[in-house]
Image (spheres, rainbow, N blue to C red):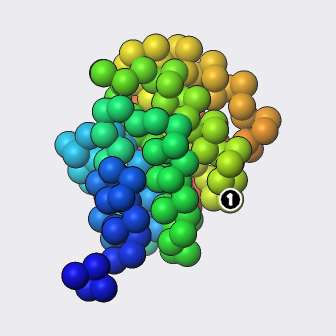
């Protein structure tokens, strides 16, 4: 019965996104369930002393499209508790450059009104970093981090 379900979770399911809403203030956009769990753990680890925790579990899968990224950000940003977003993507199958393009498109369409910290690693990561760097002036709340620990610390700091 959809009337018994969380509307954001229903919306995500219709967009082929794996989403579970939680009580924290840092949203997670990740590809892969294991990476999503590790991302939530590191947000808890660095954020607990500051009252910062994960706002959701969101696994966009290995083949995220621009349309999927836009919808994921729309769902995330519909939660008024969200004070920051951590994007943690490993491009094993998917290209990091494709993901970076999707993030920039989502930022332009949705508008990032909270800090969005991005950590990318894997296939075409240097090209992806160049795409994000080129968009920095247009998307000032979009920040990059070289590794997951740095990304978690930065999003916690920006979300306090």
Q: Is 98 on the left or on the right of 115, as rendered? A: left
Q: Is 93 on the left or on the right of 47, as rendered? A: left
In the image, 108 versus 141, the foreground residue is 108
The residue identified by callout 1 is 113
Identity of the residue furthest to the right in this view: 137
In the image, 48 versus 76, the foreground residue is 76
In terms of image quadrants, where is residue 159?
bottom right
Q: Residue at x 53, y 37 (%)?
A: 66
Location of residue 131 with respect to 20 vertically, above or below = above
Q: Quadrant of the C terminus?
A: bottom right
Location of residue 108 with respect to 83 vertically, above or below = above
Q: Residue 136: x and y, percent?
A: 72, 34
Q: Is 13 on the left or on the right of 47, as rendered? A: left
Location of residue 96 with respect to 53 vertically, above or below = above
Q: Residue 31: x and y, percent?
A: 33, 39
Q: Residue at x 31, y 33 (%)?
A: 62
| Mark 1 closeness class: few <14, some 14–19, many ≥20 residues within 10 Å | some
Q: How many marks?
A: 1
Q: Residue 49: x and y, percent?
A: 39, 67
């Amino acid at each position: 019965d959809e009337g018994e379900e969380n509307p954001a979770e229903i919306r995500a399911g219709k967009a082929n996104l794996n989403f579970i809403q939680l009580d924290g203030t840092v949203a997670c956009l990740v590809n892969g369930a294991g990476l999503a769990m590790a991302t939530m753990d590191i947000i808890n680890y660095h954020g607990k002393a500051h009252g910062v925790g994960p706002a959701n579990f969101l696994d966009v899968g290995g083949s995220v499209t621009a349309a999927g990224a836009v919808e994921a950000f729309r769902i995330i940003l519909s939660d008024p508790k969200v004070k920051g977003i951590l994007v943690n993507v490993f491009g094993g199958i998917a290209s990091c450059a494709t993901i970076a393009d999707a993030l920039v498109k989502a930022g332009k369409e949705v508008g990032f009104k909270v800090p969005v910290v991005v950590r990318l690693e894997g296939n075409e990561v240097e090209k992806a970093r160049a795409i994000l760097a080129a968009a920095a002036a247009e998307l000032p709340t979009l920040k990059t981090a070289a590794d997951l620990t740095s990304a978690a610390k930065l999003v916690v700091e920006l979300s306090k």
